[in-house]
Each structure stands twice: as C-alpha cells, then as structure tokens.
Image (cartoon, grey):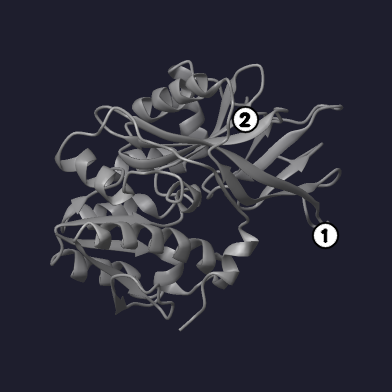
Amino acid sequence: MKILIAEFAVGTDIEKSLIPEGAAMLKTLAESFVHLGHEVYYPSAGTKICAGKHFESTAENFRQAIDRKAKDCDAGLIIAPDSMLPELNKALEENTVNLGCSPRSAASCADKLLCTEILKKARIKSPEIAKESEKGKKYVIKPRFGCGAEATYLVTEFDNEEELIANEYVEGEHLSVSLIAGKNPLPLTVNRQFIEFGEKKIEAKDSRKNGVHEIKYNGSLTPYQTPRREELYETAVSTVKCLDCFGYVGVDIILADLPYVVDVNPRPTASLFGINRVMREEIGDLLLKNRFGELPESVHIEGEYRFSKDGLGELFERA
C-alpha cells in the first residue's frame, strides 16, 4: 500500500521548536509502515527523517500538498494541531482512506468546552469548568481550541475571556492512556507524563494576575506501572467511545480519587515514540487492522522507556 503521513511541524516549518517532537512521531510511524512493506510519503518543508519518501511542502500550501498526494495513496494519517485537524482530515477523506479520527470527532475533541460537555453527559469525570475565580482555589486556564499543554497556566485568579477556558485544578498524577480507537478499542499503555510548572513573567495587560505558573509537558515514561491500570483503561475506552474517535488517540488523565479526563488528543501523540520501543506489535499494522481488519485483543509490552521532550532535539537534525 501507498500511505501518506502528514505531520504539521515537519510539513510547514512554522514552529521550529516543535519539529523534533513532530519528526519523532513521523519517523516512528513511517519506519513501522516501511518495515511492513508499504510505501510511505510525507510532506516536508526541510526536515528529513530517513524513512519513506518526502515531497516538498510549505506553510502556504500544506493542505494543497496533502490533497495532491493523497489522491495517489491508499490510506493516510495526519498529525496537526487539534484545531486544524477537522479541516485537514476532511481534505484527506475526500481523497483517500483516513486512518485517523473523522472531521466531526476531531472537532469535538479540539473544542475543550464542547469536549467537557460531552464527557459530562457520558458521566465521565473531568475537571469542572469555572466561571469566576474564588479565593483559596487554583485553576488551570488554557485556550478553548488548543493542543496539549500549549499556553496552559496554573493560576489563583483569572478574568473570563472568550478564547480561554478555566478548569478547577485537580491534584493528582499526570498520566495518559494511549489506545487504538474503533469498533473494539485497544488500550496500548498507561504513560506517566513529565509535567513542569514554571514561573511566568506577567505583563501589565495580562489578565492572569497572581500565582501564575506555566504548565509544560516534557516527555513521558512508558509504560507506567500502576495498580489502577484497568480503571484508567476503562476511562479511556469510555472516553473515545462517547467522542466517536478512531485510530490512535491519547487521553490525558489526572489520577486522583477518580480518573479525571483533562484532554483528548485525536491523533498520534509524543508517547508513541516511547511505545514503539516497548511494544512488540507494529503500530502501522495495528492502524491498518483497525481500518481494514480486526485488532488483537491485547498487545505485548516489554521493558520501559522514558524520554524528555527537550532530548528529542538531539535525535533529529535538519538536512
């Protein structure tokens, strides 16, 4: 089969700091499909991954490049900021078979307010959305349409802004569950996320006034051994079912008295880089079986792997 994998950072070169993480996910997927005997094509604005065949793209023509190449491929997968996924997955589906989430599902996950409402209706715990700050409480504020821990802050007070949402802060373990969503969702691993809380310099015009700490993701440990693994798996499976997700999905969870779902990533995540090093099965094979065949009942995990997001930069160099 001919398979298109379009990763936004590599394909546009807009945000150079994201290229190592994007290249790691792209390379992991490309190598897996190539190992299985498939041809892989990916758009590149300069970065090469030494797996598959690249074709030129830019920030200006990224979607058009996907449109053109997808017509010649049997299947495709897109990794991009969540707010862009609905449009890009729609373009993909118009030209080939989409191995990832539908545009509608991706849109539900990308809108953090809508996503929280859907989870609440399904009786899945998630941090409560706050309308105004109360003295003595902590809150996490982030873009309503954002990606992972992008522009996310821990604060003690906030002003309501249309493009931001504020959740009550839940103290607990920062984890994620990686799984293949579909007819019969297949959990892969529980991952421990390395989350850093850094001080943020406040500008006069900034509505986040006091007690502000920037929340940053800096890698993960895969798998994370916990006696509550099955509880986490059940929460993640229920989450992808109610959001109608498909393909590789990462569900971010704060594990406290109960698992609290804080983000749903309807696309490959950085954890895949570690999973590939401990999972006996090929991720490419699982993605294809999920669309064209039947998934196994479980996967085989051996050992553990940890990485830092900062350290990924040492693994990839620009051509």
Counting residues from the start of the chain, the first of labels 1 and 2 encountered is 1
Residue type at mark 2 is: Ile
Of residue 163 and residue 153, the one placed in the foreground of this image is 153
Viewer-side residue, 257 vs 130: 257
Question: What residue do we see at 78% from left, 40% from top?
Answer: 155
Question: Label 1 crowding class (10 Å Cα cut-off): few <14, some 14-19, many 20+?
Answer: few
Q: Name the quadrant containing residue 176.
A: top right
Q: In this view, does 285 lie to the left or right of 11?
A: left
Residue 273 percent coordinates (x, y): 47, 53
Where does residue 277 sit, x and y in percent of width and height? 45, 51
**Residue 89: x percent and y percent?**
29, 52
Neighbours of disc 2 within 10 Å: few (<14), some (14-19), many (20+): many
- Element assignment for label 2: strand
Dividing the picture into quarters, in which one does residue 167 lie? top right
Residue at mark 2: 254
Residue beneath the point at 42% across and 50% down: 276
Q: Is residue 17 visible in this depiction of the protein?
A: no
Inspect the image, locate mark 1, and give the three-letter code of the amino acid beneath it: Glu
Residue 54 point in image, percent of width and height: 30, 76
